[in-house]
Amino acid sequence: MTNPDLIDRLVDDLRPTPRGALSWMLAGAVTAGIMIAAAIMVPSIGLRADILTAPGTAMFWIKLGYTSVLALLGLTAAMALSRPEKSSWSGLWAVGGVFLLTLAGGLWQWGNASEAIRPVLAFGGTALVCPFFIIAFSAPVLTIMLAAMRRLAPANPTLAGLAAGLASGGAGASVYAFHCGENGLLFLALWYSVGVGLVALSGALLGRTLLRW
């Protein structure tokens, strides 16, 4: 059999991938992970006591907005970095901008608060457990994302894993936000970011091995 004949046989059964299939697959992975995380969170630690009135406060939406933006940035990066022709994605720098903006707002709020309120704004009552809950609720999302991305061909497995971890951390933090009653913007910038950052680092470490091809 000649080389052209062999090539023809290898590609004979190939079918074009539908446009947007990669994006839909990763978005579906995040959605499935969020549903599993929520199903674990509600019966285990429950929704915040004021869940019916909390959406009427600005901090509820700021918290959910911060975590959702991180998740969307991570998902967008994962979509780009899952392609073999992409080894970097400049949009990841936006993550630093979002964090610094939130931190600046937190420091402004902290600086204008009374001495008695400042520790509450920075540490609340759950600073020691917040990052670990975020890691726990991010785990299902990261597991499904990495399983989906193993079917793809990222040129930079470590960076692709970091993006998956960022998306998962933001998604897990969004789920946890429905339980967390902390109202300090500095608390959000510090402890939520620590949790999301640890998940992103875990994604990078796992991606380095699991996403290699």
Image: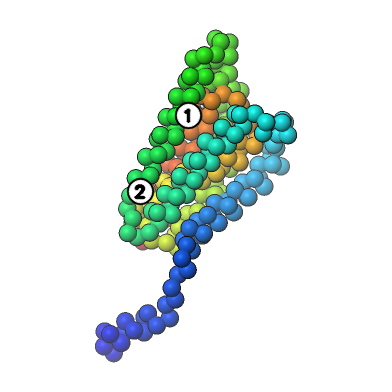
Mark 1 falls on what kind of element? helix
Q: In this view, does 41 lie above or below 213?
A: above
Q: Where is residue 108 in the image (x, y as percent from the top left)?
A: 48, 19
Q: Name the residue beneath numbered marker 1.
A: 102
> In which quadrant will I find the C terminus?
bottom left
Q: In this view, does 39 lie to the left or right of 5?
A: right
Q: Which residue lies furthest to the bottom in this view?
A: 1
Q: Position of residue 102 (x, y in %)?
A: 48, 29
| Residue in the picture at 54% in, 25% down | 185
Q: Which of marks 2 and 1 is nearer the N terminus?
A: 2
Mark 2 falls on what kind of element? loop
Q: Residues within 10 Å of mark 1 (few under 14, many from 20)?
A: many
Amino acid type at image mark 1:
Thr
| Residue in the picture at 44% in, 76% down | 15
Q: How many marks?
A: 2
Q: Residues within 10 Å of mark 2 (few under 14, many from 20)?
A: some
> In which quadrant will I find the N terminus?
bottom left
Q: Where is residue 54 in the image (x, y as percent from the top left)?
A: 68, 31
* Distance between the alpha carbons at the discs numbered 2 and 1: 22 Å
Q: Name the residue beneath numbered marker 2.
A: 89
